[in-house]
Image (tube, rainbow, N blue to C red):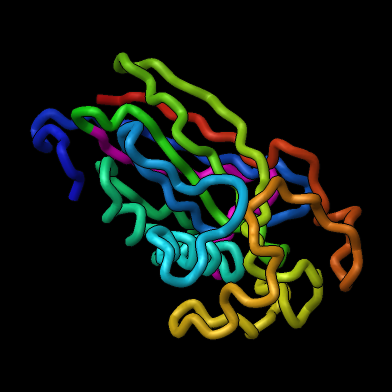
Amino acid sequence: MPVAMADGKHARTYWVTVTNAMLGQPVAPSVIATHSNAFNLFELGPAPMVGDARYDDYFALATMAETGFPFLVQEQVAASYGVWEAVVLATDRMPPVLLPSESNSVEISASGRAKYLTAVAMLGATNDAIYALRGIPLPRKIGESVHAYADAYDVGSEANEESDDTVGFLGATDDNPMTGVGINEDGEGFIHVHAGIHGVGGLDPATYDWRNPVVGVTVVRVK
């Protein structure tokens, strides 16, 4: 539950739509959160190490980036200071990915100083890429909307081998989101703008590569 926020009876309601803007990449289920300016999903640069204050947050993000599993990130974000609500947006298919050109929507609430929105998900046919939209202002008045585009980031937790053995969307089983086995091994060790797909391990760049931005997000205040 949020810390230092107003009570729920004063909550505002928003309709959030995520659109996959890429040619061939699927987008795994998103985590979407409303929050105050006290929250930041991650910082670019060196990844937290074991024992650091935000290592659990980073490990959850790495789990999402390597497997598409959203629930560790949802749990970590929901428990973070300044967060009002954190929800998962998935599709009805299996696996529950958002295919190119598709959109999907979810309702989320906010109150008090929770005036910002963050959204994040794995780019499915990658080793550890995510899209991330961090802290965009929520629309203020009922009926108003905000539209933003998200870039792709490399979480730095797994080497970009681009192979069937390491990319979850292609059937890899080397990373287990339930046990943590295989997560955060042999990566670059820092979060950075992703360099895309280069065809080094079987993924066809003509299909799976991209240019930023990769995802569009529209937020409408409905209540």
In the rendered image, which quarter is residue 97 located in? bottom right
Q: Where 85 sits versus 197, above or below?
A: above
**What span is colored magenta in the figure?**
94-110
In x, y percent, where is residue 165?
A: 75, 82
Residue 165 showing in the rendered view: yes
Residue 123 showing in the rendered view: no
Q: Is residue 164 left or right of residue 66?
A: right
Q: Quadrant of the C terminus?
A: top left
In x, y percent, where is residue 23?
A: 78, 47
- Out of 76 and 141, give the one closest to the viewer: 76
Is residue 221 covered in magenta?
Answer: no
Q: Is residue 105 left or right of residue 128?
A: left
Q: Where 22 sits versus 9, above or below?
A: below
- Out of 189 and 215, give the one closest to the viewer: 189
Q: Residue at x 78, y 78 (%)?
A: 164
Q: Is residue 144 left or right of residue 111?
A: right
Q: Could you tell me how many numbered marks the image carries? A: 0
In x, y percent, where is residue 73?
A: 42, 60
Q: Where 77 sits versus 19, above or below?
A: below
Q: Residue at x 38, y 25 (%)?
A: 138
In the rendered image, which quarter is residue 182 located in? bottom right
Is residue 104 covered in magenta?
Answer: yes
Q: Residue at x 63, y 40 (%)?
A: 215
Q: Residue at x 63, y 53 (%)?
A: 191
In x, y percent, where is residue 62?
A: 55, 65
- Out of 169 and 117, give the one closest to the viewer: 117
